[in-house]
Image (cartoon, rainbow, N blue to C red):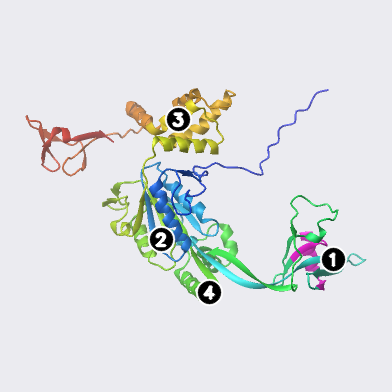
Amino acid sequence: MATTKVPEVRDITRIERIGAHSHIRGLGLDDALEPRQVSQGMVGQLASRRAAGVILEMIKDGHIAGRAVLIAGQPGTGKTAIAMGIAQSLGPDTPFTALAGSEIFSLEMSKTEALSQAFRKAIGVRIKEETEIIEGEVVEIQIDRPATGTGAKVGKLTLKTTEMETIYDLGNKMIDSLSKEKVQAGDVITIDKATGKISKLGRSFTRARDYDAMGAQTQFVQCPEGELQKRKEVVHTVSLHEIDVINSRTQGFLALFSGDTGEIKSEVREQINAKVCEWREEGKAEIIPGVLFIDEVHMLDMECFSFLNRALESDLSPVLIMATNRGITRIRGTNYQSPHGIPIDLLDRLLIIATSPYTEKETRQILKIRCEEEDVELSEEAHTVLTRIGMETSLRYAIQLISTAGLVCRKRKGTEVQVEDIKRVYSLFLDEARSSQYMKEYQDSFLFNEAREFTVCPRCLRQQENFSVLVSPDQQVTSECCNEMVSLEKTLVFAC
């Protein structure tokens, strides 16, 4: 008899994704805001993390709005990791909105509107309201169905607390809700009087010894005390942007699920701001200034920077954290150069946190953490080789080799990545320096090759194509750009 081969069924209900910063759990600070060398996925950058810890406490305090922070440093020095650490330390109650500078230009709305929506997503409103509920333990449920099978169902629900017991008449809607929640005698439930919503809190401790069929997830709670009818304070946390969308669209809160919120009129925002301030004065609401993180902030132009300058002066403003890896560069849309590509007047408002390159010891520790995150076993020699690659090329390139080396190791049915696996993937995938060298060697073979030779004027540092200089017998040159006599070795020629 032929055997039937049953294909393996993989469980896809829980998919784990490993991201570039999925190993970050916080900033790795102690109670005195002093950074630990290795903690919560963070390694090194002690001064930067100490400064970020002060910013974190300022955000948690919630009373200071309109502050802006710039995290500046070389590529691969942990700028985004620090921002993610701040987000993890804040927890779910504080709004954290992240976007890249280039996103502003790809949305189907004006740049200032996109920034306005990002600002208001980062401001939370904690709304408090009181509702009347009925809370008690179910003693008995009686449901009478008509003998003919047609007609309305009627029933009675008996609830009790430690002090009283009451019988309630049930309508058709309440009977359906009880059946949907699978409520039975011995359950502790709450009923919202305004909406009729039934919530099951758990099973009463008095029924803990009953021989009923119950799962391992069954939760036992005490029988409620006092009266059955109580007033309960309910807290909802929403962002200002969600309130804007609900009040500016005819479909109300359903517009939040459509994704395309479109532009929102300033009049709607002004009315919402006035209402939120009124709720705050009455004690009904509390404003939670969150964090807006803009990565690659040098991609913004003068119009966006001008808007940020004005927006930071508003009372309803989150803490703005920006990150960039640029030095002195041109501000987008202008011919003016500025540090980090940010206008000087905005730079004057910023608290600047600098990040520095990782040492060899710190690089080794980061690679070890990433190996644990990606579930890859490395031998001691392979770890040493990978660390040296990270120091000579870049940390990001070395991190990319971890999972690829792990795949090569599994292909040869190994359990631990060896030096040979690292060498193999190193030869397969080029780093930036080797790729640039390859392009220089074979640039004539590529289509649309536009590599040209430029000379930089040593006087004004202006780039000139086909720059001509006059060389005198004493090795002095006169630049055509500034008519300046300079030494020949100061004239810089490079390929672009």
Horizontal side of 193 relative to 436 (left or right) equals right
Q: In this orientation, which residue lies closer to the viewer: 396 or 465?
A: 396
Badge 4 or badge 3: first in the primary sequence: 4
Q: Is residue 469 visible?
A: yes
Residue 333's x, y, as percent?
A: 31, 53
Q: Is residue 288 magenta?
A: no
Quadrant occupied by the C terminus: top left
Q: Which residue is mark 4?
A: 279
As shown in the figure, which amino acid type bears the numbered disc 1?
A: Ile
Say left or right for 45 vs 184.
Answer: left
The residue pinned by badge 1 equals: 141
Residue bearing the label numbered 3: 386
**Displayed quadrant of residue 160:** bottom right
Disc 3 or disc 1, which is closer to the eye?
3
- Residue at 45% x, 69% y is 266
Tag of residue 112: 2
Residue type for callout 3: Leu
From the image, state whether disc 3 or disc 2 is nearer to you: 3
**Mark 2 closeness class: few <14, some 14–19, many ≥20 residues within 10 Å:** some
Camera-side mark, 4 or 3:
3
Compare marks 4 and 1 and give the one earlier in the sequence.
1
